[in-house]
Image (tube, rainbow, N blue to C red):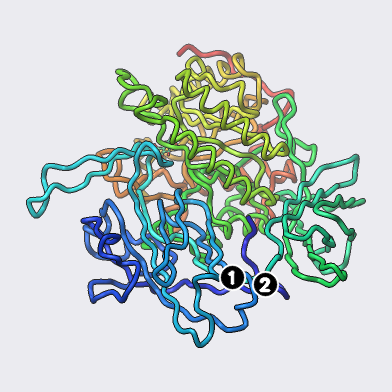
Amino acid sequence: MLYPIDTETREVRDLNGIWDFRLDPEDHGIAAKWFCGPWNSQEIAMPVPASYNDISTEAKVRDHVGPVWYRRTFFCPDAWAAKHVALRFGAAAHAAQVWLNGQMLCSHRGGFLPFEAQVNSLIRFGSEGENVVVVRLDNRLDWTTLPPGELSESSIGVDGKAARRQTYFHDFFNYAGLHRPVRLVVHPVGGIEDIQARVTRAGEEARVAVEVAAARPIFQATLLHADGTIVTTLRGAKQAELAVPEPRWWSPGHPYLYSLRVELLGDGGEVVDVYRLPLGLRTVRVEQDRFLLNERPFYFTGFGRHEDSDLRGKGADDVVDQRDANLLKWIGANSIRTSHYPCSEEFLRLADREGIAVIGECPAVGLFKFEEQENPTTPIFCDERAGEKLRQHHLDTVRDMINRDRNHACILMWSLGNETATHEAAGVAHFTGVAQLARALDPTRPITIVECNYPRYSKIGHLVDVIAVNRYFGWYLETGDLAAIAGKLGAELEEWRRRWPKPFLLSEYGADTIPGLHKLPAVMFSEEFQVEYVKACNDVLDRCPYVVGEHVWAFTDFATKQGITRIDGNRKGVFTRQRQPKAVAHYLRRRWHTLATKHSQFSPNSNPTPPQHEDLASIHPNGSASERLPSASR
Ligand code: GCB
């Protein structure tokens, strides 16, 4: 799916800003035909894009379970009548129904990916008058959604009525709303529908296989340097392969972007439609226990990153995105995982430009019940829970995610799920199908399925290219015991290694930390503890040559459901929710910049005053001669 951009043949109009908004606690909006006719005075003003939860001061808005409605009006110029006009939602959480001028336009399931519908037959052009778009969103999670959830009726209603109660098993707040930009996208009728640009390497040369989906087949593909000079150009019929003799390869250290200009040609050779795709040339593959970017070992440094910020919730915001990119560069991180759902297209475009490698994750999270670990009742992968409907939705989501993001140089790997019941035989069957689909759609990228199971229970290692594990020794396990980390984590890494000798990524490790809380000696929740905890884990990783990366959990503090283990959200952030550093950020900054100067390919794009104070010369990620940890007892 193409990202909406302006070109000489295309136009984009933002419909962001203030919309009218209503809760629909009784779920009677459809029966009352809220999709047509004027609304009365019950609506409140709601900014888009944003989650609606934290904008209002009322708990009934923040904690609402069920449908809500958005509405706004707009005009359309006459000139668009001869064009293809579509209404496009960047993301609407979690299920959406859209009406235009009182008529049903489209519906969509899933809160983290875009959808669009052509509007020509319903829209009013020029003097035909004003258009009204109405959206009904539903934030309810059940065993057909990703992430899943369970609904029940609470017996204690405020007004004597039973209230709906939503439970879910993932650790982030169930924000909802029109989370990403809403736009009108205008292009020529019969224009370019989609482009796929697949980069491969032939010796020192790069090849770009371009495929164009459109009603007519003939196009001209031109690769341009950043300064606009032409590298190469070729005509194709539905496809063409460009050869780039001396490519400037993309990496976090050198995020060089070419521009691929695709011109769709008419019968007389005239240009019918033009699209420009920013294109980084790079290859990625796994060989034995190494992760290779442009045929050189790559070591991931960085974080799991949530889309989460004050007031906006999960609402897209350029200010937050750019600050995040700047923090990643400041700390020397080269990568993030889009934990635990596909992030915004805007962030991926930024990551291409700034040199942030990305592990793109789909929202298969919460498919594990920790509280049932000791006493399993119903398996996760069964008809009453994650059955056929959820499986289909998972497949659709992976398909849509890959189709949306496949042209981004920054995406180095797909994650098909986070912490799922991979010990269940039915879970293996489920993920076998999902992994097959991902590989068929994109044979150019490795895949992973992020684990919380121990290696002796996990049954999916054969499906993935990289073993990615979230592990919290010293926090959830061996709580408070920093000294236990070396033995426990070291032994587990060895066990993974014996079972599946593949590259290993520690995809989460971290400790909740209240900024400003200091304790000597270190105790849990203090800044000192977080530093010692992260160091202790890193010491283990540094001794294991098959480790290809470290992603600390989490990039920033973030909102989650209320609970006795959460003080104002999840506080494992290396940065606060307001994007300021905790003490551990300074330690990581020294470590990662030192790694980056030793291995230029790891480095983020710019390196502002690399810190000098600590000698980390003993670090050898991907090193060959590094010392192995003795297998510790468990
Ligand atoms: C995990 C999950 C992440 C949680 C984190 C935690 O393993 O993947 O979503 O937020 O642990 O802090 O408990």
Residue extending furthest toward the left: 160
For this rendering, which residue is in front, 268 or 467? 268
Q: Secondary structure at mark 2?
A: loop
Task: Name the image quarter holding the C terminus.
Answer: top left
Query: Residue 430, image x and y in percent?
Result: 51, 27
Is residue 480 visible to the viewer in this orientation of the structure?
no
Query: Residue 19, image x and y in percent?
Result: 38, 72
Check disc 2 and report the residue beneath it. 10
Amino acid carrying mark 1 in the image: Val
Amino acid carrying mark 2 in the image: Arg
Please give the name of the residue rendered at 41% of the width and 41% of the height, measured from the top-left corner: 147
Check disc 1 and report the residue beneath it. 85
Query: Residue 87, image x and y in percent?
Result: 52, 66
* Marker disc for residue 389: none
Q: Is residue 278 above or below residue 611?
A: below
Q: Secondary structure at mark 1?
A: strand
Q: Is residue 98 above or below residue 588?
A: below
For this rendering, which residue is in front, 217 or 503? 217
How crowded pointer 2 is (Cα within 10 Å; few <14, some 14-19, many 20+) is rated as: some
